[in-house]
Amino acid sequence: MSVRFSTLPSSIEFKRTHLKEMQAAGPTAASTRQPTMLPSGGQRARGGPAQTSGPRLMQAPATCGRSCPFASSSPGYFQTRRKVQAAAFHDPEEEGSMAAPNDAQEARIIVITSGKGGVGKTTTSANLGMSIARLGYKVCLIDADIGLRNLDLLLGLENRILYTAIDILDGECRLDQALIRDKRWKNLSLLSMSRNRQRYNITRAHMVQLCEAIIALGYQFIILDCPAGIDVGFINAISPAKEAVIVTTPEITSIRDADRVAGLLEANGIYNVKLLVNRVRSEMIQKNDMMSVKDVQEMLGIPLLGAIPEDPQVIISTNRGEPLVLQKKMPDSGVALEAAAQRLIGKLDYFVDLNNPHKGLFQKIGEMFN
Ligand code: ADP
Ligand code: MG
């Protein structure tokens, strides 16, 4: 336990101790988490390679009571669902215009999730997607929230959405018609699952099928902005994903939800998981009023992708529909998100970039680790 731990005010110390005890007792304890829903032989430490090639299991965790999205579905369930028209995924304009098609293994499907709402998933999705697109990759952002979309607003694309994924599944349009290309960076596209307040029984099979079709169009990254919660919307969003970024704030409620989500991801075969700590306030950390990034990372036991400071510019950027990473005078949060994007694609293998113009920010983040 670090020195910082021992100097914490009692309330935070109590909460931390409480969380650790809770974790130790619960089935998703960070230090002892076992992927209990894995097939036998598939148990592994978090972060290591998967030891099973068996199918993902979607079994109900012990605490899941009601009609359960985690229960494995029989094939019949999907067969009775509306079949996605193969023609819907055919895009004559794309044919031949794309680079050599990627096979499914090359493309990366990353879900941005958290459990708790309002911690910064959509902000993260928009900015990571934009950053990776700017680095030259073909990126598709999927707003997986059915009925309450808002990724389009953050990207300033809300007026350009004519069709959604539900229209594709209904056979009303082709995939390319629902993929909205960003005018600033044409290799970034947005697919919204639905219009606001629209209801539709999207299934895991639909999500997988959509992602396969998007990859067939040559996209190298699919970033899924996951809805809050751990119900059916969450399960649908994680179904096609091969990796995940868990967003949390340095608050006990958010950390506990992140821990729960980490357990569910593991139980569903997603082992490549990284942590992004958002809304970090270094002045509060210095006063021991907020957990440090290191504290949060140690509690969750998930490899760190990055830390984003609390920044009023995030609200301005949201209201303007202009992602932080696109701004000429990039705010601190934009620099941190850009760095996280570069780490995600393996272009940055350190946390502190002292050569960066926002040196102060990185020094602050560095201090949080010491
Ligand atoms: P989620 O998708 O997890 O619900 P959002 O990305 O929509 O979260 O963010 C929720 C709210 O928090 C928004 O009002 C957003 O502007 C604000 N926010 C997110 N990250 C930050 C940050 N680093 N600094 C300040 N405000 C933030
Ligand atoms: Mg959101």
Image (cartoon, grey):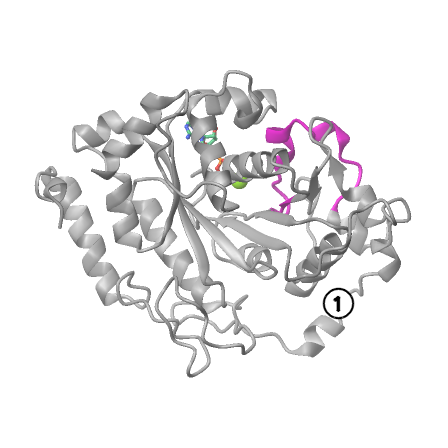
| x, y percent for residue 117 | 45, 43
With 118 as the anchor, is 135 left or right in this view?
Answer: right
Q: Quick check: 322 above or below 303?
A: above
Q: Which residues are magenta?
A: 141-164
Q: Amino acid at mark 1?
A: Arg
328 vs 278, nearest the viewer: 328
**Identity of the residue drawn at 74% across and 50% down:** 218
**Identity of the residue drawn at 78% across and 43% down:** 178
Which residue ends up furthest to the bottom in the rendered image? 40
Which residue ends up furthest to the top in the rendered image? 329
Report helix, strand or loop for mark 1: loop
Q: Quadrant of residue 271?
A: bottom left
Image quarter of the C terminus: top left
| x, y percent for residue 293 | 29, 40
Circle 1 packing at 10 Å, graded few (<14), some (14-19), many (20+), is few
| x, y percent for residue 207 | 67, 58
| x, y percent for residue 164 | 75, 44
Does residue 201 appear anywhere in the picture? no
Does the magenta segment cover residue 256?
A: no
With 242 as the anchor, is 38 left or right in this view?
Answer: left
With 326 as the anchor, is 49 left or right in this view?
Answer: left
Residue carrying label 1: 81
